[in-house]
Amino acid sequence: MIQKVLVVGSGSAGLIAALSLKKKIPRLEVKIVRDPDLGVIGVGEGTTPNFPTHLFDYLGISRGEFYRRAEPTWKLGIRFDWGPRGRFDYTFGRQLDSHWPGLERPVGFYCDDEFSHVDLPAALMREDKVFLRQANGCPDIQPWHAFHIENEKFVEVLESYAAEWGVEITDGKLVSTEQDATGITALVLGDGRRLEADFFVDASGFRSELMGRALEEPFEPFDKTLFCDRAVVGGWERTREPILPYTTAEQMDVGWCWRIEHEHRINRGYVYCSDMISDEEAAAEFRRKNPKAPESPRVVRFRSGAYQRMWVKNVVAIGNAAGFVEPLEATALMVVCSHSRTLIDFLLHCELEPTPSMVALYNEQASEGWKDIRDFLGLHYQLNTAGKTDFWRRCREETDLSGIASLLEFYRENGPTGFCRYRTGRTNSDFGIEGYLVMLVGQQAPYEKRHPATPEETTLWRQRREQLAKAASGGLTVAEALAYIRHPAWEWHGDSRRKAG
Ligand SMILES: Cc1cc2nc3c(=O)[nH]c(=O)nc-3n(C[C@H](O)[C@H](O)[C@H](O)COP(=O)(O)OP(=O)(O)OC[C@H]3O[C@@H](n4cnc5c(N)ncnc54)[C@H](O)[C@@H]3O)c2cc1C
């Protein structure tokens, strides 16, 4: 029976996994070893809604305390400056998988000319507002938001929770492992110390010390679908720029550029394909578009893909040590949270004595989940008809989307109907069918079964969107909402807020 768990790495993956294990299975002894000289990756600031849900609802971390210590800002979705429309917004709400009263078809069939203000979060995004205002003036904070969060600050906050919750962190560099037929029995550190445990979590980032190096599990690259493998990263201190309630993803010559909104800092990074542009050329294009970026932005290398199995013998890999896809949809922390939960469910169900079939099921689910994200991201690239460079031509011609071929065929015949959900793979990510529909409609992917709107429908369509725009324009900006939640009289209750007095 598993009693002692040792986590390698105290980046966000290692800490989230360790805290989740300790919280949900308190009888486990959970320890972390990390190499302070290596540090953490220092990028990874966009999240999806499962991230605040994991922190507050699953782990029971106090919202007030977290907001005070980690200083997140809210993210309602992603603005794509991208594709033939030039711009479209992807929210965490239900934009297209819905049917308005009075309209014969689902919303996506009416978006030929204008795809905006189709739900409240989308309307708020267009108006640069984050939440509606309640009658008393307070922000009406809804659960359909995620966070922008600074990686290093987040790690510091999680470390303080580790200290409070009894998760011990040891400094030391793992240099080798001791193994027997059941898996790893001990880690050997650079100074000769041996750390024993009966279950290990590899959260050592791209180094994948246990899964990749010690156990030599094969890595499956996603390079037939996702061509980008590097980023130049560099932001600047915010001056007068408003804090936007969304991440921006802007099309570039050989990839795309993120803009992430922290309260005092704007973070940008250009994700590109190193086969088709040099680091220097990428940095130059990045600087042309972002004159405030540093002269020599940091280059971060990565590979999109995942280990074939993420649970081998008595080792589970989490975070970048298990797999990574480029950050176009900011999926890494989403996957860390969902894998941590699945691992805990499985451990509890097998009463801390994992069976081979449980391990096989975990691997199957984790692997399918990665492939689902791979295909979803591939769609962003393959559909973009606006990119005129060799890179974008290659994306249109070569991106392997065989994993969702039946969805694309179904859409081509039937258009943006919710029935598309039966042609996607696993849809238990935060994207689901909504994500696919937004990418297809947002990039004007052609389909046959069109619905010409009647004059009555056109009027209804316009009126409803105008109502949403009007409501959203009266909402609060991020700066205004932050001021409210920092007021001494502010109290948090669940996902919505109340102001005392
Ligand atoms: C360009 C880029 C942009 C990204 N953007 C996003 C985003 O917007 N949203 C998102 O969710 N994610 C994003 N990510 C991913 C995100 O940064 C990570 O998934 C997340 O922070 C988790 O990282 P990690 O904990 O797996 O690894 P790391 O932060 O690298 O931590 C690894 C840990 O392992 C330890 N370690 C390594 N080797 C040893 C050893 N031999 N001995 C002891 N300790 C060791 C290190 O000391 C460290 O503590 C991005 C990644 C990249 C590359």
Image (tube, rainbow, N blue to C red):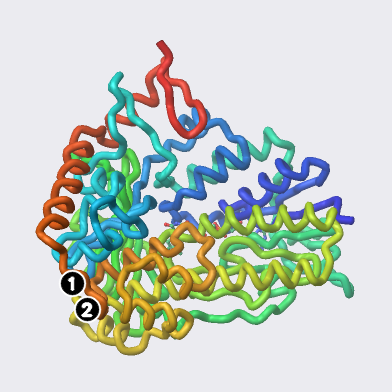
- Residue 276 rendering spot, x and y as whole percentages: 31, 84
What residue is at 78 percent from the left and 41 percent from the top?
Answer: 26
| Quadrant, the N terminus | bottom right
Disc 1, disc 2: CB below 8 Å?
A: yes
Residue 105 sits above or below residue 5 on the image: below
The amino acid on which the numbered mark 1 sits, given as a three-letter code, is: Pro
The amino acid on which the numbered mark 2 sits, given as a three-letter code, is: Thr
Q: State the CA–CA distance, disc 1 to disc 2.
A: 6 Å
Relative to residue 202, is residue 73 drawn left or right? left
Q: Which numbered circle lies on residue 84? A: 1
What residue is at 65 percent from the left and 53 percent from the top?
Answer: 341
| Quarter of the image where one finds residue 363 | bottom right
Furthest toward the bottom, the residue is 397
- Residue 494 rendering spot, x and y as whole percentages: 51, 31
What residue is at 38 percent from the left and 84 percent from the top?
Answer: 399
Pick the residue in front: 190 or 119.
119
Relative to residue 346, is residue 369 drawn left or right? left
Pick the residue in front: 274 or 333.
333
> For numbered disc 1, what is the local secondary structure?
loop
| Quadrant, the C terminus | top left
Q: Residues within 10 Å of mark 2 (few under 14, many from 20)?
A: some
| Quarter of the image where one finds residue 394 | bottom left
Residue under numbered circle 2: 385
